[in-house]
Each structure stands twice: as structure tokens, then as C-alpha cells.
Amino acid sequence: MTPHPPTLSQSLSREANNFDLVRLIAACAFVWSATFVIRQTGSGDGVAAASDLDSVGSLGVYAFFLMSGLLVSASFERQRSASRFVALRFARVLPAAFGAALVALFVVGPILTPLTLHDYFAALVMKREGTLSIVFDHGNLMRAIGAPLWALTGLMLCYLLVLITGAFGLLSTRRRITLAVLITLVAFLMRTRLADLQSGWRVFPDSATGLAFAPELCFLLGMVLYGWRERISISGLIACGLLLVFLVFRDTAGAQILLYIAFVYGLLWVSVTPMLHGWRPRHDYSYAICLYGFMVQQCVAARLPGISPMLAVIVGAPFILALAVFSSRWIERPAMKWCRERIARNEARQRERRKTRELAYERTPLRASDPAVRWPPL
């Protein structure tokens, strides 16, 4: 008897999925594609040249947002507290981003700026009018800081969406979460038509970043997948079949839609298949790789402008990995540990206060004037 394929709901536990591996691959794909963008080769990465559709970097960004929509929605339902959710999201995102900004200013900045080290740090300290424009000469340092964080604003808006929908109880059932996503999608599409509705999300299509569409739409899709997790079965045969359909019709007008369907379902299969459990990383370095990958490749391009993108990735990979490990071990994990311990202490303190009030109420003797004694009247 052939066993039924597992559902997405059965694969949400950390021991039963490969989400960390998928995010690691997505982060590496982003760095690989960013190398071609920095060097402005014009040919694009191998996937873009072969398929004439999306680049491997854009697919990596889509995968990152899709996984975030799925896992962040699950995180809110697991926490069942808006305050805990907000605290954990800030602890996950902001300390590492702040550390990356410091590295950009005090390590990457001296490498990219045309100023001497003395003039560079003097300009940072003095903060006089016009000095920062010299520090950010040619936009290299601004790109090194801003490019890895351009998606952070969109992610924070998506986190806010999960917070609002969760606070109103719209994440509890698949119909409610689908309704919330549809309302958000209508507002998003109205924003693309009306200039007065500026939500901060990029316009469809997002040609400024080389993406076919705003990646926040993938976050919304991840939320829908979470809502329907009990009904979504993951099968390797279906994933291969969808890939085969795309390859057969890759030269037709609907090739890009078929690519996205095969990509999303294939991504889910890779995320849950037991065949890849042995390749799961012990720690999640994906966020730090996204933060530091573009910076390091900017430095490599500035110091070694003549090398090929492939060689640039090889040269920059050890530095990216070292910075990612440093960020994960000394910034991200301590921040998350401190936040969880603080939340646990606060909850324990609140339980003690409630227990103390209940005991005090039970020990207080009743008097004839108390309402509990006088009511109901005889």
C-alpha cells in the first residue's frame, strides 16, 4: 500500500523540515547574483542566461520571502502573544542589522572611500554639512550599506501585517487568513495604480531591483500556504511533473507562470524531503550571509576590479562565511537567548503576582458587609 504524501502541516516542526537549508541556499544565490550586478557584466548569472527569465538571485529572494511568510505566521500562532512576537522579531532582525551597519562604517567604509583613513574618520566624527557626501563618494559605501537592507523594510512591513492579522484572530483558520491576504493584495494593487496610496512596497513590476515583481507578494503566498497547510500534500512526483511541464512549454507565453508554479512547489518539496535532512546546517547563517555578502563583494570589486565574477565569489566566500559565523555566534544567538530569557522571567513574575493575589483573596475572611455575604438577600 502506497503511503500518503506528507502534508505541509506535518513538516513545520524543526526536526521534520529543511527550512534552514533552503534559506542558506537562497542567501548564497543572492550573493552569487549580486556579484554579477556589482561588476555590471551585462550577461547575468547562469540561470538568467539559460532560461531568459528570472535570475538565480531573484529566485533566492522569492524563496526567502516565501519561507518567511510561512514561518513567521507559524511563529505568531506558536507565541500567541503580540508582545512576545514583536520582541522576538526585533531580536532576530535588528541586532544583526546594527552590527552589519557598524562593519560597513568602520571596516568597509575605509576600503571603499577615496579619503585617507584620518579624513574618513574625522568626517564621521565631525558630521559637518557635506562631509558625509564625501564619505559616501560614488555611492559605493551607500550601496554596500543599503543594498543588503533594501528587503529589510519590506520584511518589517510584512511582520507588521502578520502582527495585525494575528491580533485580530485572522491567522486561526484558512478562510480568515485567505481573506486577510486578499484584502492586503487589493490594497497592494491599488497602490500600484494610485500615487496617493504609498505603502512603502515596491511597484509591480519591480524593475529597479531586477525582480519580476515585488517579493512581498511571495510573503503573502507563504501566509496563504500556512493557512492551508493541512490540505497541501508534498510529493516528489508532483514536483518533478511540474518541472517537466515547465521544460516542455518553456518557449511559450506562459513559461514564466509555469516556472513560478514549479518553483514554489519544488521549493516546498525540498523543504520537507527526508533525503536532505543530513545536509541541514546546525545554525542559520542565511540572514548574516545576506547582510555581509554584498558588502564583501563590493570590497572585492574595489580592490580586484579585473577578476571574473566566479573568481570574485571564491575570493569573497571565506570573508562572508567568517562574518556570518561571527554574527550568528556573537550577535544573533546571544540576542535571541537574552530576549527569550527576559520573556520567560517576565511571564514567571506575572504568574507569581497572580498566584499571590489569588492566595491573598482566599485568606481574607468574609465580613457581613461584603457583597458576597449580603447577596443574594434572604
Image: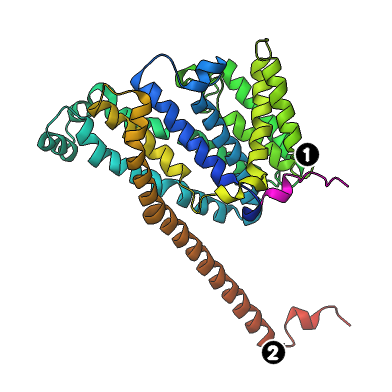
- Is 351 in front, or is 153? 153
- Amino acid on which the number 1 mark rests in the picture: Arg
Stretch of the chain drawn in magenta: 1-13
The quadrant of the rendering that contains the C terminus is bottom right
Residue 229 on image: x %, y %: 74, 43
Residue at position x 82%, y 45% in the image: 4
Q: Mark 2 or 1, which is nearer the eye?
A: 1
- Is 343 in front, or is 194? 343
Residue at position x 64%, y 34% in the image: 220
Secondary element at image label 1 = helix
Tell me the CA gap for discs 2 and 1.
51 Å
Q: Which residue is mark 1?
A: 175
Inspect the magenta stretch and tell me whether residue 168 lies in it: no
Q: Earlier in the sequence, mark 2 or mark 1?
A: 1
Q: Which residue is mark 2?
A: 365
Q: Residues within 10 Å of mark 2 (few under 14, many from 20)?
A: few
